[in-house]
Amino acid sequence: MIKYILPLLLISCLTVSSCSSKQKQFVTTLTIDDSITTNVQIDTVVLVLKKRLEMAKFKDVIVTANYKEHLLTIQSAALDKDWIKTNLLKKGALIFYECYSITELADIMNEADKMAAQKIAGNKTDTSSHPLLSAFYSYAQQYTIGNTSRFPSYIGEVTKQNIPRLKKYFELSKELFPADAALVFKEENTTTENAPPLSEVYVVKENDTKFFASNYIKKASAKADGKYNSVEMSFDAYGTYAWKRMTERNINKAIAMVMDGKVLTVPTVINTIEGGNSIISGVLKKQEAHDFADLLSSGYLPVNCSLKEMHELEPAE
């Protein structure tokens, strides 16, 4: 077994299995970027990283924390730097939000557009440019199913280039919107052949009604159904209760499922869900679904981390 001598400060060492003398070992150093971090949060990061490495089939791994210097070290086979950034260090925070509809916000958006225009013009009355409303590519349009007329759960669509603009004018007029209103986007929505790639714009309720699903996931697995891929989740006892309550109060309303600030899907609740299960479907490629399931099963990172360096570990004499 290869011995690796660590300073006394490097504690919370978690060993998956003993190191193989036949495989080169590397030390990957990560930096905890958050300035305010507790030892409990760091311990959680160690556990989450360990789980993610195990799920990715890495063996002979040691994950270690240096509390004082806010550093983490991973002793393992070589890790791909792109994989570290896109998989290992993803926060993996899955949150379910209640949404505001276009019918609730239409009048507010018109007034907010006027306020943004006045602020841009130096408090002079000038609404000709319509800064907020013109940032949209299109607005949510009413449609009919059977004898029922409905609006989509999003309020409009926007090009990627106009997202910063929309956010800017939303902030200029934020005082007119509900205090808990927050913008989120579902990227790359395909519309007509001649339209550019569009993102759907949702206004979610950033308040105590949100359900932090990542905290209560007991199991997650990827499923394939023809050309569609999905991720099935089951919650623990409290998560089952919280999910039931959320669906119960949102019958015929939309719930936005958001991962790390990006909308994955926005299903409409048909019935109360009592079994503690949920599905995210139709938005992932096959490998993405497996990676996403692993991400949910491993838990979320409570702090932001980044790659500092990686070097080969010299074998002990």
Image (tube, rainbow, N blue to C red):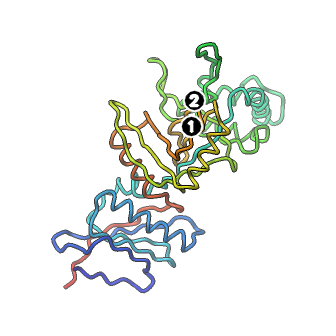
Is the Cβ of the residue at disc 1 closer than 8 Å to that at disc 2? yes
Q: CA distance from mark 1 to mark 2?
A: 9 Å
Residue plotted at (38% across, 71% down) = 63
Q: How would you rate the neighbour count of disc 1 (Cα within 10 Å): few for under 14, some for 14-19, many for 20 or more?
A: many
Q: Give the number of the disc on residue 153.
A: none
Q: Residues within 10 Å of mark 2 (few under 14, many from 20)?
A: many
Quarter in which the N terminus is drawn: bottom left
Name the secondary structure under disc 2. strand
Of the image marks 1 and 2, the number of the one nearer the N terminus? 2
The answer to which quarter of the image holds residue 73 is bottom left
In terms of image quadrants, where is residue 313? bottom left
At x 76% / y 32%, what residue is drawn?
A: 112
Left or right side of 291 for 274: right
> Of the numbered discs in the image, which one, if any, rests on residue 185?
1
The total number of labels drawn is 2
**Viewer-nearest of discs 1 and 2:** 1
Residue shown at 72% from the left, 26% from the top: 103
Which amino acid does the dot numbered 2 rest on? Val
Q: Is residue 144 left or right of residue 85?
A: right
Residue 178 rendering spot, x and y as whole percentages: 76, 40
Q: Give how far across and how far down residue 26 sits, in percent.
A: 28, 69
Does 53 appear above or below 275? below
In what element is the residue under mark 1? Answer: strand
Q: Quadrant of the C terminus?
A: bottom left
User: Which residue lies most toward the front here?
Assistant: 274
Q: Which residue is mark 2?
A: 158
**Quick one: 98 or 285, which is closer to the camera?**
98
